[in-house]
Amino acid sequence: MINEHDMTKSMLGKMRSIKLIKEVVDTENTMGSTETTNQPTETPNTIVILKNGGEQSVENSIFTLWKTDKQTFMDRVSSDVSFTDFEITPKSGSNEGDVKMSGKLNAYDIGFTMNKNASLGLLITTAIEGAQSSKVKLDDTVIKTLNSLNNYYQIWYKDWSEKLENENFKNAQNV
C-alpha cells in the first residue's frame, strides 16, 4: 500500500519531468530553408533581452522596457534580486505573444518565473538551478515579499497584455 507522502512525491516527480516552458526558437538555422508547406510556418521571433544574467544587444526602445520593468520590480517587490532571464515573443497571427521574466530573491533563496502566458503564470521555487530544494521559514517578512511579488505579477501581466496588443514588435529583434 502506498502512503500519501509517496504518492505526492511521485506526482511531483512526474510534474517536474514535464517541460513547461518553451525553448527559444533558433531562427538563424531556419533562415536558409527553402522547404514549403501548405500551413503557415511563421514563427514569432523571440527577443531575448536578458539570458542567464547577461544583457543582450537589443533595440533601445525594447531595452528601455526591460529597464523599466527591472526598476519597478525592485521598487515594489525587493531590491535584493538577481534577474536571470527576460524575453519577449511578439504577438503574431493566432499567437497572442508572451513575455517571460525570471530571477531569484536573494534574501530568501527563492526563484521566480513570471510568464504573461496565463497557463504558466507566476511560479516560485526553492530549488534554484536544479539544486536540492530547501526549507524557507514563512515569517512575516517572507510572506510580505511573496505577496508583493504576486501583486507585482498581477500588474505586470495586465501591463504586458496591453503592450503586446498595442506596441509594434513585429520587426523588433536582437541586434
Image (cartoon, rainbow, N blue to C red):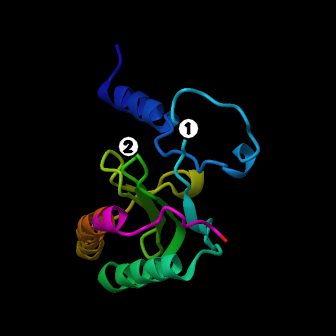
- Three-letter amino acid code at the position of disc 1: Thr
Q: Is residue 48 left or right of residue 26?
A: left
Task: Give the secondary structure at mark 1.
Answer: loop
Q: Which quadrant holds the C terminus?
A: bottom right
Residues 100 and 31: in front is 31
Q: Earlier in the sequence, mark 2 or mark 1?
A: 1
Q: Residue at x 54, y 26 (%)?
A: 38
Q: Is residue 106 left or right of residue 118?
A: right
> Magenta segment, which residues?
162-174
**Residue 165 counted in the magenta span:** yes
Q: Within the image, what quadrant is residue 119 found in?
A: top left
Give coordinates of residue 60: x percent, y percent.
55, 82
Instruction: From the image, tell me which residue sits under label 2.
Output: 94
Q: Main secondary structure of the magenta part?
A: loop
Give coordinates of residue 78: x percent, y percent.
37, 80
Q: Number of labelled discs?
A: 2
Residues 158 and 94: in front is 94
Q: Within the image, what quadrant is residue 167 found in?
A: bottom left
Instruction: From the image, tell me which residue sits under label 1.
Output: 41
- Three-letter amino acid code at the position of disc 2: Ser
Could you tell me if residue 52 is visible in this image? yes
Could you tell me if residue 125 is visible in this image? no
Q: What whole-number distance in Å separates the C-alpha atoms at marks 2 and 1?
A: 12 Å
Mark 1 surroundings within 10 Å by alpha-carbon count, few (fewer than 14), some (14 through 19), many (20 or more) = few
